[in-house]
Amino acid sequence: MNPNDARKKAVLLVNLGTPDEPTTPAIRRYLKEFLSDPRVIETPRLIWWFVLNLIILRFRPAKLVEAYKGIWKDGESPIRRITNQQVSKLQQRLDQNTNGPQIKVAAAMTYGNPSFTTVLNTLKNEGYEDILVLPLYPQYSATTTAASWDALSKALKDMRDIPQVHFIKRYYHHPLYIEALASTVREHWKTTGRQAKLFFSFHGIPKSYVDKGDPYPDECVATAQLVAKALNLSDDQWQLSYQSRVGAAEWLKPYTDETMKALGKTNLKGLDVICPGFSADCLETIEEIDEENRGYFEEAGGSDFHYIPALNDQAPHIDLLEALVNENI
């Protein structure tokens, strides 16, 4: 028998994180951990400490309470609820289709709960020695994938006997990922009809990060191009932009909010919007895209705005996750 077959194996699905509840103190705790990460904010530490603690954390959390309350459901944030659903469905799939010992599926968050430390200690106590870590970021960026690697490494640093770890870096062009995105667009078209343009909105990062070597925008463009090709879209039938910018620094362009306003002014009749970089719906898709940017588009004169939900726990997404596990476990 192969010695590797004897080790108990686990899969760890990783997402960004969420406040524990939609309250000012909980949001402040989450933002402090998230925005203190030098992978996310590269401003010199002393300057950033004053900005974060004396400005952002004093005022921003209270402003986000209503937005978080608006997306909270059944006492849980969407990103944690959906990630748990992904864990459950992937576990069922692996139990059905895996020969040999069971592969356990669990979830961890880079920031907030459940933390890497908590989950890794639980897996260790249960005897799991071989762990596949799958960050749910299709396109690699130092701000997301590498940040999850750092959180994983920090947790492992405190363990005397560390497990065998395999880490999946990216899957932006995996055929099943592209097909999952194309499939969700096709299913959307069946119920709402096809609009004039398909709009891809990816989370933005500062342009300076790209200038230093972050490959993220190239992978976003590649994903959009592959999906457009799978859907047989011509160049004038789709468009790409970047959302969620903050501060005065230049971020990746074009900006989603400015593009929505410009498209609305053309009186565009029908816009389908998809956010391929988000594996689970969250504040940035539900509130920022389907509410805020929908408003920009419609106020400028556009009509028939349709947000296509993230892949979440849909079957084609679970197909992809199962394939990634089988290819890497």
Image (cartoon, rainbow, N blue to C red):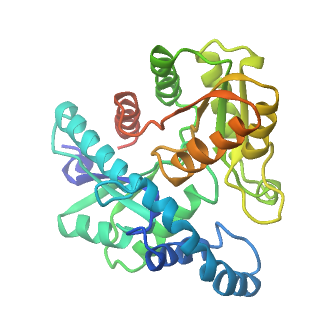
Residue at the image position 30 percent from the left and 66 percent from the top: 119
Is 284 placed left or right of 269 in the picture? left
Residue 139: tell me if it is visible. no
The answer to whether residue 228 is above or below residue 48 is above
* Quadrant (top left, top right, bottom left, bottom right) of the N terminus: top left
Query: Percent from the top left, x then y, of residue 323?
Result: 38, 33
Query: Percent from the top left, x then y, of residue 122?
Result: 24, 68
The answer to whether residue 163 is above or below residue 191 is below
Residue at the image position 36 percent from the left and 48 percent from the top: 82
Query: Percent from the top left, x then y, of residue 215?
Result: 71, 47
The answer to whether residue 249 is above or below residue 45 is above
Residue at the image position 15 percent from the left and 44 percent from the top: 101
Residue 205: tell me if it is visible. yes
Q: Nearer the viewer, residue 233 or 152?
A: 233
Is 10 placed left or right of 69 in the picture? left
* Quadrant (top left, top right, bottom left, bottom right) of the C terminus: top left
Residue at the image position 66 percent from the left and 80 percent from the top: 52
